[in-house]
Structures are given as structure tokens and as C-alpha cells.
Image (spheres, rainbow, N blue to C red):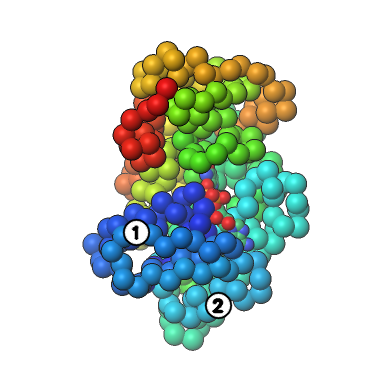
Amino acid sequence: MKVLIIGAAGMIGRKLAERIAGDGALGGKAVERLVLVDVVEPKGPTGGIADVKTQAIDVSAAKATEPLIAERPDVVFHLAAIVSGEAEADFDKGYTINLDGTRDLFEAIRHEHARSGYTPRVVFASSIAVFGAPFADRVPEDFALTPLTSYGTQKAIGELLLADYTRRGFLDGVGLRLPTICVRPGAPNKAASGFFSNILREPMSGKEAVLPVADTVRHYFASPRAAVGFFLHAATMDTSRIGPRRNLNMPGLSATVADELEALRAVAGEGALALVKRVPDETIIRIVDGWAPDIEAKRARDLGFTVEDSFEEIVRAHIEDELGGSVRT
Ligand SMILES: NC(=O)c1ccc[n+]([C@@H]2O[C@H](COP(=O)([O-])OP(=O)(O)OC[C@H]3O[C@@H](n4cnc5c(N)ncnc54)[C@H](O)[C@@H]3O)[C@@H](O)[C@H]2O)c1
């Protein structure tokens, strides 16, 4: 089979590409060709697929994805996006990439469908940012989509398009409302959510990290490893079981900052915990206050999506996947 990953240079896209290349297969079928695109050319993965192509493509450029779809990949993973902070700061850029880029991709598929009957599986990276406060303690499965950011709005429109193009038979779509992915590898970034990862990742490498909110703050998480699992399962599952609601709340772990710190202490010791410095930041406190503490994901769990049960598991996954199995404190 042929597989296309758009957004393959990103944090999840890279891991997804490595996993598929390593397995050499998807859902028990051999992957003969893997095409990886991103606005910056992705690195080729280290696995055993002979035919891997990497390419720099800006999905927001007119008809940019047409040549990719002309190759008729069986599975299309669409992860390319700018994230919430940037989409809020630059209104035009957010709508151009996150919405117009998505619609152009779906249009390229529709046109290929009209030519040849092509109907690929499309897995779309959505977000729990499609939901907006005020929230109950647990956001129910059928909570109205009332995003409070431009990013969340762009993802919500993408979800509607995915569902309609699926209903019309142009593609076979599955939208994944991803929890906040933690522990995010790499250097600390400026995302308001960055501290959730920083306070674990940095101390495990012997570095200080700033905690800008109270220990009681609760949010909804999954590891990068679990996120890759969501994409693989969505690519291979029997979509006749989903029904018309093609966008699914992914399972996650509802946990407090205190739960995170306890996992850090249990795995890396008191020395690592002492590297977390409490420096309240009113702006971040206000932003995080508008985020969902917990989300119902029974439909996805019933359909076979799985996630970690504890923060300790999330931390251990990071140590295995990013730190070669041990911490340095
Ligand atoms: N990481 C999270 O916590 C999280 C949570 C919810 C949803 N998501 C969504 O999951 C997807 C992947 O997330 P991630 O954490 O890997 O993000 P990321 O920022 O690491 O990756 C996104 C990729 O999209 C690429 N991209 C941006 N503009 C592009 C363009 N015009 N053309 C082509 N590629 C472009 C970027 O270069 C980047 O490599 C995104 O769609 C994101 O919105 C992520």
C-alpha cells in the first residue's frame, strides 16, 4: 500500500513516519511507498521501506497537494497545521494553512475520486480545542463545538468538512480530537501548554523548569507514543463501526499538575522535583483556566483506541522513547 503523511516534520508526524517505516506495514499490509511532506523537508525515517520520498510542500499554496493525491495513496494522514498561539497571533496565516490547506487537500481527493473512484482513508489531526469553556467537570461526548480560539475554529471547520466529504463518499475520514500531548520532546517552546511538558522533561535532563500555575490545575493528556497509536488505529480500523459522527474524542488521562510532579518524584527522585521552580504567570493562569479538565471518550475507547492509565506511564514512555531508558538528575 501507499501512505502519505502531511506534516511529517512535526513532532507527531516524525514519530508516525518512524513507526510505519520501522514496521514496514500498516494494519498487516506491507507499505511499499511512504511519502513524507511538510513545509520544511522531513528527514527520511530509519526503517526498512525502500521507497521513501521526502518533499517540502506548503499545503496552503494553490493546488499544492494535487500531485501527491494523483499518486493515489491508500492512507492520507493530515497533520500539517500551525498551532494555537501562532494561529491567534496571525489570523490570515491560521485560516490559510489550517482551513484553506485542509479544504484544498479534500478537494484534490474529491477531484481524483471523480476521475477514478479513488476513496482513501483520511486521518485528520483535530484537537480538544474545538471545545470551549464553560465546561462541566467532564466534557460530555456530545458537547457542542464552541471553540474559543481561531485555531479551534479552524479545526472544527476541518471536522465538518471531513464528515461531509465522507458522507458524500469522496473519502473515508476519521478525525482525532487529540488531548494535549505530553511529554513533548525537544527544547521548551512558547506554547501556553509548554510547561506541562517542561516540568517533566527538563528536570529529567538535570535542568530547571518553571511552573507558572497552581499544582491543582487539571487537564487532559496523552503521550506522543499514544498519539502515534491513535493515528495507526484510525488508519486501519473498520470505519463502518463509527457511524456518521466521524470525529472522535481521543481517550486521555485527566490529571493535575500535582499528579505530574508525583510521577516525576517517583521516577526521577527528589532531586529532579527540586528543579521545578514555582513562578506564577497571570497570563498563563488565565489561558489554562479556559481548558477542559477532562473529556468523555467512550466512543473512541469502544472502537479500540487506548491511552495511558497514569502519569507515571507517560513519564516512563518518555524515558524509553527519548532518553535511552534512563534519567540524568
Ligand atoms: N501536540 C499536541 O498537543 C496537539 C494537540 C492537539 C492537536 N494537535 C494537532 O496534531 C497535529 C500535529 O501536532 P504536532 O504536535 O506534531 O505539531 P507540530 O507543530 O510539531 O507539527 C505540525 C507540522 O505542520 C507543518 N506545517 C505547518 N504549516 C505547514 C504548511 N503550510 N504546509 C505544510 N506543512 C506545514 C509544520 O512545519 C510542522 O512540522 C497538528 O495538526 C496539531 O494541530 C496537536
Write down the quadrant of residue 193 in the picture: top right
Badge number at residue 66: 2
Badge number at residue 46: 1
Q: Look at 44% across and 85% down and name the residue there.
A: 116
- In front of the other: 268 or 125: 268
Disc number lying in front (1 or 2): 1
Of the 4 image quadrants, the one containing the C terminus is: top left
**Which type of secondary structure does the marked residue at label 1 adopt?**
loop
Q: Which percent across, then down, holds residue 28?
A: 23, 62
- Classify 10 Å Cα crowding around label 1: few (below 14), some (14-19), many (20 and above): few
Residue type, mark 2 in image? Glu
Write down the quadrant of residue 298 in the picture: top left
Q: Which percent across, then down, holds residue 263?
A: 40, 21
Determine the residue located farthest toward the left in the rendered image.
Answer: 28
Q: Look at 53% across and 64% down and name the residue there.
A: 41
Q: Does 175 sit above or below residue 101?
A: above
Residue 86 appears in view:
yes
Residue type, mark 1 in image? Thr
Q: Are marks 1 and 2 in contact (CB under 8 Å)?
A: no
Q: Look at 35% across and 73% down and name the residue there.
A: 51
